[in-house]
Amino acid sequence: MVRLFNTKRGLLALLAFATIWFIILYYFVSSAASIVTSNAFESMAHQLFGALGLSALLDWPVSEYAIYWLVAVYFFPVFSVLACSDQICSDKQRGTLRFITLRSTRLELIAGRYLGQLLIVSILIMLTIAATVILASVRDTALFGESVIIGAKLAFELLIVVMPFIALMSLLNIIVSSARMAIVVAILFFGLGPLIIAFIKYQLGQEFYLNLIFPGGQINSILSQNGLDGSHYILPLIQTVVLLTCSHILMKRAAI
Amino acid sequence: MSLIIEVENVGKRYGDKQALEGVNFSLNQGAPVALVGPNGAGKTTLFSLLCGYIQPTSGSIKILGHKPASSALFGRLAALPQDAQLDPRFSIASQLTFYARLQGMSKKLALKDTQRVIAMVGLQDASNSRPSELSHGMRKRATIAQALLGAPEIVMLDEATAGLDPINAKEIRAIVAEHANDVNFILSSHDLSELERLCDQVLYLESGQLKQHTDLNSKESERFITLRMKQEYPEILPSLMAMQGVTHVTVTQDREYLLSIAITQNTVAIELELLTMLHKNNWSYAQLINGKTLENQLF
């Protein structure tokens, strides 16, 4: 938290984040919402969102959230991979970890850094939700109450989505030696991983459900926000627990 | 005296390289202990094992009765690992306060203790500076300060004075000497005269093996006198050999003589005789050491 809000590098990253979200909210969410709600484009938007299986999003009273959700559900996982790429790498490289491990266990270190990153991403999610609430309320003040309720629900959904992504970066931080390398490995994991799994499946002719190891596997099914139940949260939560357990096991044996 | 460190048959292998092999020793509470050895001998590996940064390939280690890195050692074992740096983005005081808080101190106590250790290493004027704004020596002193937080029972300093100017190195030695009665220091350094001044015991590592575990206060080493002359005097060697009670004289290095004294001989009488002889011949000496220098004991 201090690193993000009290260091030059952190504040610059925060400024970049704010700029990106200003563009998204101002040019896409705000203007797209007015298009969606206009009579001329209503039928076209229904056809388009219907074709994508997302027509349930148009039923939300706060239409800004339809665009917000579509952007945020893909933005925040990618952002988490980038923003959480240095959980312990630089401390390990610099030797600072040696001072810390004389005063805390490795489990505390892994859990503390993970929860810290999760808290940061949660705060940023809340900020973007708050900005969307303001946008919707400016358009129609009567929407304030509804937008807060939907916003809270979406914030919770987004939090569940990003949890395994942050846990994956925790694991990569233990395996590799730099934040940049952690991002590279994450890109290879998401880029080449499905190809390798498809190849294994093709060669052996059997389904091993290996695709379950990829965080974000449930995103496509939660995108429409239609008929969601608790089972959609199970996969990301299991992935988070498994990734953090692996991080702990590796960290216990790691040389620092 | 209670046992503080117990190392049993410890080995550490990095791939094909055996960094440490069959290391056995135990240390009791007491005066500082020196860890000596050539580059690549395994000193830093042994330090890292004792601090729990790495796991041994074989053997077992007990620190104050606990495994290294055990939570029972937090605040009781402190260390200055070689080349470890503080985070360059935060002030020294804030980082030390954070470490003190991790050790379990209250916020108020952590702030107070931070000021205490910063003053000990003479960094009062730089306490709010970030490590990136400080010189190498000042950064080193800040890392030494973190090892002194709280009331540790064991403090391991790996090359603590390396890179420090003579005045600051002297300050660090003074800190070690001042606290040697309350804290068990384990020091690694290439400066043998420094270790000789501070330590009573020496662990000598070579090629990953513990070659010697020497007690510098042992009676055996007192049957020697080391004489260092200011200049070269060609006639001094025969004169030294002719002295009564001197059984053997070795020229250990340029202008340095190691006199072996017969067990039956009174060492003090020889010292007086030696000084008288030097005075009579108008030979200037630089140093007279009771016993062998650490360098001569080890090599």
Image (cartoon, coloured by chain):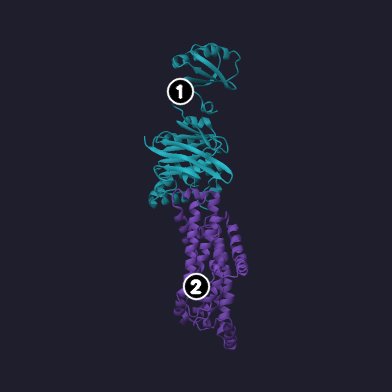
Chain colours: A purple, B cyan
Provide the chain ID for the residue under circle 2.
A
How many labels, in total?
2
The extreme left residue here reads B1
In the depicted structure, whether residue B174 falls above or below residue A77? above
**Depth-wise, is mark 2 or mark 1 nearer the camera?**
1
Q: Taking the image as drawn, is residue B80 in sight?
A: no
Q: Position of residue B111 (x, y in %)?
A: 41, 49
Q: Give the camera-side residue of A122 and A157.
A: A157
Q: Amino acid at mark 1?
A: Glu
Q: Which residue is mark 1?
A: B220
Identify the image quadrant of the C terminus of chain B. Answer: top right
What's the chain of the residue with tag 1?
B
Identify the element where label 2 is drawn.
helix
Percent across and percent down for residue B10 are 48, 41
Res. A129 mark: 2
Q: Tell me the CA gap for discs 2 and 1.
A: 78 Å
